[in-house]
Amino acid sequence: TPVEETLVLVKPDGVARNLTGEILRRIEAKGYQLVDIRLVEADLELLSQHYAEHQGKPFYEPLIEFMQSGPIVAIRVAGERVIEGFRSLAGTTDPTTAAPGTIRGDLGRDWGLKVQQNLVHGSDSPESAARELALWFG
Ligand code: DAT
Ligand code: MG
C-alpha cells in the first residue's frame, strides 16, 4: 500500500478549545508520522484558494470568516493510505451526528454548534492533498 501525505488543519475552534494536543495524539496513536507542523493565521487569499471548490455555496462566507477567527495548526501527515485514513479518523462533516470514536464525534459539541466548527480539516483526495500541501507549506 502506498505511503501518502495529507494536509490536516486543526481549525480555530480546535486551537481555542486546547484540543490540538488531543488531535495530534490521535494522529500519532494511529501510527501516522508528523512531517511538518506550523501555526498559521490564515488570510483571505490563502483561505479562498483552500476552499475554492465551495465558493458560491451558502456556507462559504461564514466558513471563511470562521477560519480567520484565530490561529490554525497546519500539519503535514504521512502514512499508508493516510488521506482516506485521516478522513475516517475525523468523522463525518457535521459533528452533531459524527460517529463516536472519531475526532468530530467525540469532541464536537452536541448543541449551539455551527457545522463549520468541526475541529479539523483533512484533504479528500491525492489531488487535493498535493494542492493543499503546496498552499499551506509552499
Ligand atoms: P469536510 O470538511 O468534511 O471535507 P466539506 O469539504 O464538504 O467538508 O466542507 C468544508 C467545510 O465547510 C466543512 O468542514 C464545514 C463547512 N460546511 C460544509 N457543509 C456545510 C453546511 N451544510 N453548513 C455549514 N457549513 C458547512
Ligand atoms: Mg472538504
Image (cartoon, rainbow, N blue to C red):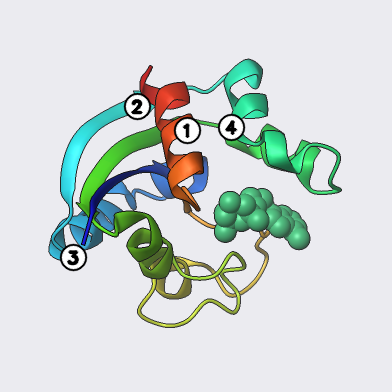
Label of residue 50 in the image:
4
Q: Disc 3 marks which amino acid?
A: Lys
Q: Where residue 56 sits in the image (x, y, percent)?
A: 86, 39
Residue on which disc 3 sits: 30
Q: Disc 4 marks which amino acid?
A: His
Residue on which disc 1 sits: 132
Among the two numbered marks 1 and 3 on one chain, the one whose residue lies closer to the N terminus: 3
Residue on which disc 2 sits: 39
Residue at the location (29% across, 60% down)? 81
Secondary structure beneath label 3: loop
Among the two numbered marks 1 and 4 on one chain, the one whose residue lies closer to the N terminus: 4
In whole angstroms, how far apart are the C-alphas of marks 1 and 2?
A: 16 Å
Secondary structure beneath label 1: helix
Residue 63 vertical position relative to residue 72 in the rendered view, above or below: below
Is mark 4 in CB contact (under 8 Å) with mark 2? no
Residue at the location (36% across, 67% down)? 89
Question: In the rendered image, is residue 40 in sight?
Answer: no
Left or right relative to 48: residue 132: left
Secondary structure beneath label 4: helix
Among the two numbered marks 3 and 2 on one chain, the one whose residue lies closer to the N terminus: 3
Using a 10 Å C-alpha cutoff, classify the residue at mark 4 as few (fewer than 14 neighbours), some (14 to 19) or many (20 or more): some
In whole angstroms, how far apart are the C-alphas of marks 3 and 2?
A: 22 Å
